[in-house]
Structure formats: structure tokens, C-alpha cells
């Protein structure tokens, strides 16, 4: 889990506003240096001014997803980590529940 291993973290993010995705791909100057998403794509339409995006990062800076969107004039109002390295959150897992990792392929990658 240490940042030096650069495990990719993927999030599903609901954003209010219309962020410039190309700027977020290229990189944004934050107070602790330049940051950029490894990948970003619009996931699904939201209601009103909200839109859902799927973003991935290789760093683990404090509140990095929120700060990146704020830097381009958008506000994150929902953030869910859906993948950490090779471990993906099952879509059918209810909030607050857990499931033991038993897939040997995933465990070998860790």
C-alpha cells in the first residue's frame, strides 16, 4: 500500500460543474506540485449539473481527487474508491458489508 509501489487507485466520482478533462489529463499545479489523473472518462449522466466520472491515480496525496477537480472549477459531491491495484470493489456488495479475498489470482498479484 506504500505510495512507492504506485498501485493504481480508481474512483467513481460525482462532480458538479463541467471540468476540462484534457487539463486534468495533462496535469494541474496544486500547492504540493503538479498532479494529473492516470485516466479519466465520463461514466454516466447525472442529474442537473452533476456528472459521474471514472478516474484513476497512481499517487496517494491527501484529498487529491477533490483538489484536482476544484482546480478546474468543479466540485466533488460523491467519491467512491472502486479499485485499489488489482482488487476491485464488487458491484453487488452493499455499503458497510465486506467479503473475504479468496481469488488466488488477485492474492498472487498482491
Image: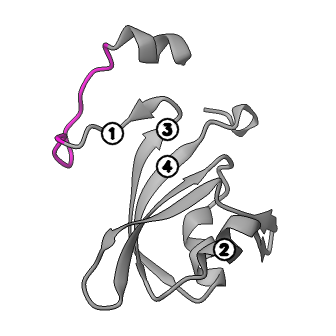
Which SS class for mark 3? strand
Q: Which of pointers 4 and 3 lies earlier in the amino acid sequence?
A: 4
Which SS class for mark 4? strand
Label ID, residue 89: 1
Bounds of the magenta segment:
92-102
The secondary structure making up most of the magenta span is: loop
Which SS class for mark 2? helix
Within 10 angstroms of label 4, few (less than 14), some, or many (20 or more) residues?
Answer: many
Q: Which of pointers 1 and 2 lies earlier in the amino acid sequence?
A: 2
Q: Which residue is mark 2?
A: 22
Which SS class for mark 1? loop
Q: Which residue occupies 66% across, 82% down? A: 71
Q: Which of pointers 4 and 2 lies earlier in the amino acid sequence?
A: 4
Q: Which residue occupies 49% across, 63% down? A: 41
Q: Which of pointers 4 and 1 lies earlier in the amino acid sequence?
A: 4
Q: Which residue is mark 3?
A: 84
Asked whether residue 63 is in view, the answer is no
Instruction: Between label 1 and label 2, give the one nearer the viewer.
Output: 2
Within 10 angstroms of label 3, few (less than 14), some, or many (20 or more) residues?
Answer: some
- Image quadrant of residue 107? top left
Q: Nearer the viewer, residue 56 or 43?
A: 43
Marks 4 & 3, CB-CB < 8 Å contact: yes
Amino acid at each position: 500500500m506504500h505510495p512507492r509501489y504506485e498501485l493504481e487507485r480508481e474512483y467513481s466520482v460525482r462532480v458538479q460543474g463541467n471540468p476540462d478533462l484534457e487539463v486534468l489529463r495533462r496535469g494541474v499545479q496544486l500547492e504540493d506540485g503538479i498532479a494529473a489523473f492516470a485516466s479519466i472518462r465520463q461514466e454516466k449522466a447525472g442529474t442537473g449539473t452533476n456528472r459521474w466520472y471514472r478516474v484513476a491515480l497512481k499517487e496517494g496525496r491527501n484529498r487529491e481527487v477533490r483538489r484536482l477537480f476544484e482546480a478546474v472549477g468543479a466540485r466533488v459531491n460523491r467519491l467512491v474508491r472502486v479499485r485499489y491495484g488489482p482488487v476491485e470493489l464488487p458491484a453487488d456488495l452493499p455499503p458497510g458489508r465486506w467479503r473475504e479475498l479468496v481469488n488466488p489470482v488477485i492474492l498472487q498479484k498482491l
